[in-house]
Amino acid sequence: MTIRKGLMLVAAMLLHMPLMADGEGKLVPTWNAQNVILPASQVTPNTTWTAQAMVFSAGRRYTDSDYNHVWGTPPSDADGRKWYEPNYRLTNDTQSWKEQTSPFSSDEYYMGARSFRWITVDMTGDIYLRRSFTLDAPVAGDLFLVCGHDDAPAEYYLNGELVFSATDGWNNDERILLTPEQKALIKTNGEENILALHVHQNWGGAFADCGLYEADMLRVVELLPTLEAGSWPCCYYLLNSNEELGSLSPKEWTGRCADDDDWVWGYGPLSNSHDRFLETYWGSERQPLLLRRHFTLTAEELGHAVQSTIQLSCSYDENPKVYLNGTLIWQTNGWNDNNYAHYDLTDAQKQLLREGDNVLAVSLMAGNGGGHIDLGLFSTSIEQPTAIEAIPAADHPSTSWSSHVYNLSGQRVATQSTHLPKGIYVSQGKKILITK
């Protein structure tokens, strides 16, 4: 059976050139709750931790006039240092610091552990915590700071520097990826570090939490990028009805050898409205869509891909069926608005990949309301980052390389630390933070 041409949109013709996979990819920090550096109550509830705590409360129930009203701040010490600074000496004024044990919550128990109940659900108040910790070696990967707070304002400091703040709302699962400059604030030579935080309570449940977790460093290779990397080349075909789509054999259009020369060549994503997905217009309320994307793998890239995790990422509307080199690998019903579904290919599905030309194909039904498609294919593998200790320290100032400057991958970038761009470097066995 030959596919009949339906009503097609006018589009610019493109050369039939397959997209080459990016063999190098990029290193992406990814959350892993098992990589505990400093446990947090929300993430690692079976491990409690202690901190110096100070609580302020007027003992009054919340009213609208009290919204986000901070009831007190710990006083500076005798030398003028603030409550969040590393060498701050605990004060015992009207309010005193006391060592307390996590979790810090308005509940009697939080995730199975007895709480330090610093406030009740119907009272408004503030808690300040100072948590000390030491590290005896650098952390090779990036770091996530867990900063769960209920409510706000909330502030988090690492060794005296503000690294996170919230001015409104609550989020017990809040976490952020520390920037390289923020990570460099942490001492890794056995000296004391201070993680200090303030959380305000307006009404309802209260919660204050903190922790540090090392990221999994994933090497991500874009076999087929999504909209995040910009528009992408494709060919597409519009059918007349959902009935025609249902009667069409996938063998006729999904495989590598299917003839797509008479398809429309253009750029995706496709959408029926002026939204973030509109690179090419698709009248999804009237016509089903067939779409094909080509990409090429070398023998080396193919060998790496089948040993990695391969993930399909897809934002759709509606009822997509996705094929890899002619075989159905994933389908679902309905739509997911602006979200993306993520699906890891099985080992058997990864074996569908071929050296040379490959095709990822998708069909979507016509339907009322919105319609769009954005999809991509990614290869991911965990990479062990190189720790800073891999760079030799200078034993003597006169050593020929003693003034050389290295990046965090161990590559020499300069012979001295002047006129470098902002970032973290290593020279003479020590980390250097360039901020200007």
Image (cartoon, grey):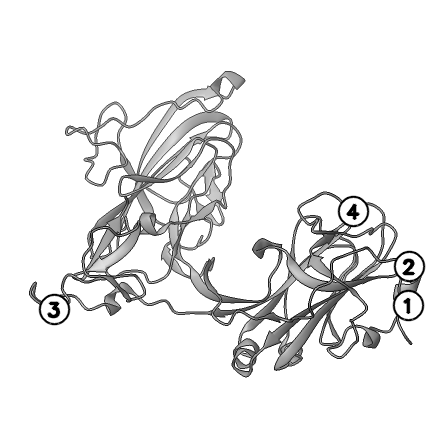
Between residues 115 and 405, which one lies in front from this camera angle? 405
Is residue 281 placed above or below 324 in the rendered structure?
A: above
> For the residues carrying marks 2 and 4, which lies nearer the camera in this image?
2
Nearest to N terminus: mark 4 or mark 3: 4
Q: Is residue 103 visible?
A: yes
Q: Secondary structure at mark 4?
A: loop
Residue 194, located in which quarter of the rendered image? top left
Which numbered circle lies on residue 240? 2
Mark 4, residues whose alpha carbon is within 10 Å: few (<14), some, or many (≥20)? some
Q: Which residue position holds label 1?
A: 4
Q: Is residue 118 visible?
A: no
Mark 3, residues whose alpha carbon is within 10 Å: few (<14), some, or many (≥20)? few
Between residues 291 and 193, which one lies in front from this camera angle? 291
Identified by mark 1, the residue type is Arg
Q: Which residue position holds label 4?
A: 370
Which numbered circle lies on residue 400? 3
Determine the CA span between mark 1 and mark 3. Answer: 73 Å
